Amino acid sequence: MTDQLNGGTDAADDHALFDALRKQVARAIGGQPFWAERLAGINPEMLQNRDALGSVPVLRKSDLAALQAQTPPFGGLTATPAGDLARLFMSPGPIFDPEGHGRDWWGGALALAAAGVEKGDIALNTFSYHLTPAGAMFETAAHALGCAVIPAGPGNTADQLVAIGQFRPTVYVGTPDFLKILLDKAAEAEIDTNSFRCAIVSGAALPPSLRADLQGRGLKVVQCYGTADLGIVAYEDGGEGMAVNDGVILEIVRPGTGEPLPDGDVGEIVVTRLNRDYPLIRFATGDMSRTLPAGADKRRRIAGWMGRADQATKVKGMFVRPEQIAVLRKRLGVDGALRLVVTRHAEQDSMVLKIEHHDAQLAGEASDKLMEITKLKGQVEIVPPGSLPKDGKVISDER
């Protein structure tokens, strides 16, 4: 068990989970104006199980930007003043995320341990360390297990290969796509990567073909699911699907509502995170999954990530949202439609922004602004006005 809860509890023990939830809700109502207003009329003592939790209103991830603009920096959702936190992050959107003090604050240690990470391992952490929280999320998890970390971040493949040769890391942390790039480049340069024993991957889809490729190189590959707001929600541990993490109450609801669905039905993931610094109660992620039968440890399980309930999607581990495309359209000053098409080639994500416009010269400016707004590179294609489908899609994920 980690101490991400500042005195946490076990996800397999619903009694302990809901006891901690009642205490958290009582604290939030008593000390946080946002939650006091939102939970008005809710008696914490009535929250004995998931059925009772269904009476609490859902907070959508898409609501955060407006809340944070109204009440900087975190929309009034944090219980700890900003100056008393450990790190302050800005994810694309922008959405602002806090990190508090404490061992394994994001709850990633169990995911790493399930992959076989042990004290004394050296982890190559290729998640971003710049403003977004993923790098810190996995670094704190590795440190909690007693591991050294190479803070590599994404990109700079040539330098990373030098670091691999010098430090001989045993653990890879990052997106599965970038791991393949590293291993392929290392093979071309005849650099030995046999020190790697396992890989913890997240932030992008892991198709069976890519998993087979990576495992065929002698790596144990373990996938986990998390968000910048919630930390690590679930992780593979050798059983079917993913195990729900400690300190997490997970529900599957009908998309766009707070209505719980029966076990086994596909719906939207709603998470209540038991964290004293940043309590999130019935937080709708926009991601889809379904519950699976519990394993021998009675830990709640989900099938893993099964797509989005909205048009937002992840590209190379970063969320791209329709709102960002709307901002881009405004900045370009165009009247025609924009459509971001996301595909996959050679086990890598790629995206093409199609713009209805008469001037092909717009492509260069659009490419720069696409990078500025999404933090991702993509191609731009200027298409004739009126040629894009009128199906309401701003982002078309065709992977």
Image (cartoon, rainbow, N blue to C red):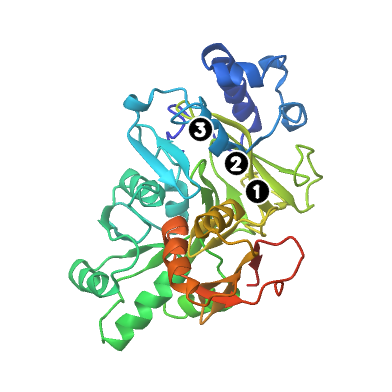
Viewer-proximal residue among 371 and 107:
371
Please rate how many residues cluster around mark 2, counting C-alpha atoms within 10 Å: few if below 14, some from 14 to 19, many from 20: few
Q: At numbered mark 2, what does the secondary structure look like: helix, strand or loop?
A: helix
Left or right position of 200 against 353: left
Q: Nearer the viewer, mark 2 or mark 3?
A: 3
Q: Position of residue 247 (x, y in %)?
A: 54, 35
Viewer-proximal residue among 386 and 284:
386
When asked about the image quadrant of residue 178, the answer is: bottom left
Q: Which residue is mark 1?
A: 286
Residue under the point 65% across and 45% down:
300
Q: Which mark is residue 254?
A: none
Q: Earlier in the sequence, mark 1 or mark 3?
A: 3
Distance between the Cα atoms at labels 1 and 3? 19 Å
Callouts 1 and 2 close, C-beta under 8 Å: yes
Please rate how many residues cluster around mark 1, counting C-alpha atoms within 10 Å: few if below 14, some from 14 to 19, many from 20: many
Left or right position of 156 against 50: left
Residue type at mark 1 is Gly
Q: Position of residue 49 (x, y in %)?
A: 72, 28
Q: Which residue is mark 2?
A: 61
Q: At numbered mark 3, what does the secondary structure look like: helix, strand or loop?
A: helix
Q: Earlier in the sequence, mark 2 or mark 3?
A: 2
Q: Which mark is residue 68?
A: 3
Image: 285 above or below 315: above
Residue type at mark 2 is Lys
